Image (spheres, grey):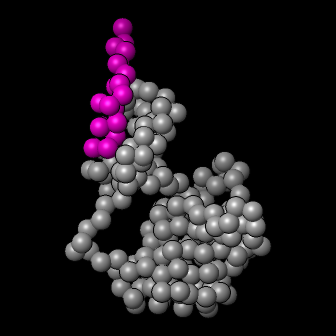
Amino acid sequence: MAEKRKKVLGEERRELILQWLLQSTTPITGNELAERTNVSRQVIVQDISILKARNHSILATAQGYMYLKYQGEEQVLKRRIACQHRPEETEQELMILVDHGVTVKDVMVEHPIYGDLTASLMLSNRRDVHLFLTKMKSTNASLLSELTDGVHLHTIEAETNEQLDDATNALKQAGFLLSITE
């Protein structure tokens, strides 16, 4: 007879989630956390909300949950770029960025009613881009940029200015770049 796993309850579960996120170098899906603790994914969503309310820097991405770790020694350079392209050019834009060693931290559009709408992306490599696009397709979701005729902003990060420069120059050559802010 199969042994039924016991649910991990309340505070103990949230402590475990926090520990797993802190130890992980890659995102952990809500489904994986639910399976590890033998609860529903909705319970995990509530736990993440509680942990965020307690000022834990947890980021929900298309790949799963991540704990944002701030390291003083490792300097990350950031830029905000404005781009415009058709939805079918999204993969090309994202691949240009990650192929230059850049992390695409987020996407932002300006909505006439809601103001700035921002979504976390945290795409650092081709696999991340592939998973993101696969999830977009499988859920039949729309890109935020479809609300703004393709115009959108990205916060991009890299270890060197050269990586940021090369990535933005490649976007410019592809006809996607509108402007850059430091």
**Left or right of 108: which side holds 43?**
left
Give whichever of 148, 169 is nearer the camera.
148
How many discs appear?
0
**Left or right of 57: which side holds 40?**
right
Give whichever of 178, 85 is nearer the camera.
178
Q: Where 132 sits versus 73, above or below?
A: above
Instruction: List the single residue furthest toward the left.
Output: 73
Which span of residues is magenta-colored? 1-19
Residue at 38% over, 55% down? 57
Residue 128 locus on image (x, y percent): 49, 61
**Left or right of 70: which side holds 89?**
right
Quarter of the N terminus within the rendering: top left
Residue 171 locus on image (x, y percent): 59, 85
Q: Where 134 sits versus 169, above or below?
A: above
Q: Give yes or no for residue 17 being in the magenta stretch.
A: yes
* Image quadrant assignment for residue 136: bottom right
Residue at 56% over, 74% down? 154
Residue at 32% over, 44% down? 18
Q: Is residue 22 visible?
A: yes
